[in-house]
Image: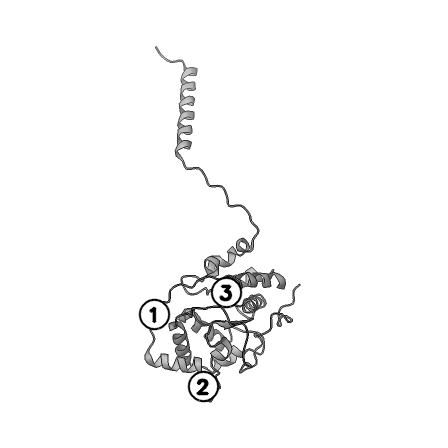
Amino acid sequence: MPVAPRALFRLRRCGLAVGVTALCLMLPARAAPAPFEDTMAQRTLACTACHGAQGRAAPDGYYPRIAGKPAGYLYNQLLNFRNGHRTYQLMTQMVEPLSDSYLREIAEYFAALELPYPAHSSVPVSVQELQRGEQLVRHGDTALRIPACEQCHGVALTGMQPSIPGLLGLPRDYLKSQLGAWSSGQRHAHAPDCMATIAQRLSAADAGAVTGWLASRPLPAVTKPAARLTAPLPLECGSAFDASSAAPAGGNRP
């Protein structure tokens, strides 16, 4: 017996409803959005998107490790990007609206992270480069008026509190790029800019030797920055300020 048009419409609508219900049951449940925590870890996700999870460094070597660096050093760099002493548009745009106190809070958050470094990997460096690099790092070159790296960055080369960074655990290309930026005037620090002075005294070969030797060295068992300098710095350095004193030039937002 033929089905009435109205009954046929009802059957079709019922079948469609059953089909949609079955399809919904087959689909996985949609995950609930992560709760808003308002923690520094959550606020700094914009930082770790480039610098790696928890600031451990990006795998490409371009974005360096920021976890565990001295708070004064990190604070200096945030000020430098905000005030134009360092030029990278993405960083400048991120920190430009932020106050000095909030930049310091970010710096102190990352400085307090104690995270293991990845396993050390070998770096292709010639014997001659290694010998020259070790000479410059450990003893400097008095004829060229280049102080030893360890005079400022510590004998262990893990940095000095409150504002001198470590030099180990960084890719060679990153180290070379920063020396090049200081030498060419693309990177600046608080005056007197001791790193610019040193970089401009280094030849390209010597810069390659220093960075090759540093990148080839494994990290020591203790990677924390040394507590304090044990001797006067060989050069005046505006970035080596005491974090308990007034902020360096450029930090002027409440």
97 and 166: which is toward the camera: 166
Looking at the rendered structure, the secondary structure element under dot 3 is loop
Residue mark closest to the camera, 2 vs 3: 3
Residue 22, image x, y percentages: 40, 29
Residue to which mark 2 is pinned: 141
Residue mark closest to the camera, 3 vs 1: 3
- Mark 2 neighbour density, 10 Å: few (under 14) some (14–19) many (20 or more): some
Q: Residue reaching furthest top? A: 1
The quarter holding residue 236 reads: bottom right
Label placed on residue 58 = none
Whether residue 122 is visible to the viewer of this picture, yes or no, is yes
Residue 252, image x, y percentages: 65, 67
Q: Earlier in the sequence, mark 3 or mark 1?
A: 3
Q: CA distance from mark 3 to mark 1?
A: 23 Å
Query: Which amino acid, by three-letter code, is at mark 2?
Result: Asp
Q: CA distance from mark 2 to mark 1?
A: 27 Å
Tell me the quarter of the image containing the N terminus.
top left
Residue to which mark 1 is pinned: 122
Query: Residue at horizontal 33%, vertical 79%?
Result: 127
Q: Earlier in the sequence, mark 2 or mark 3?
A: 3
Residue to which mark 3 is pinned: 68
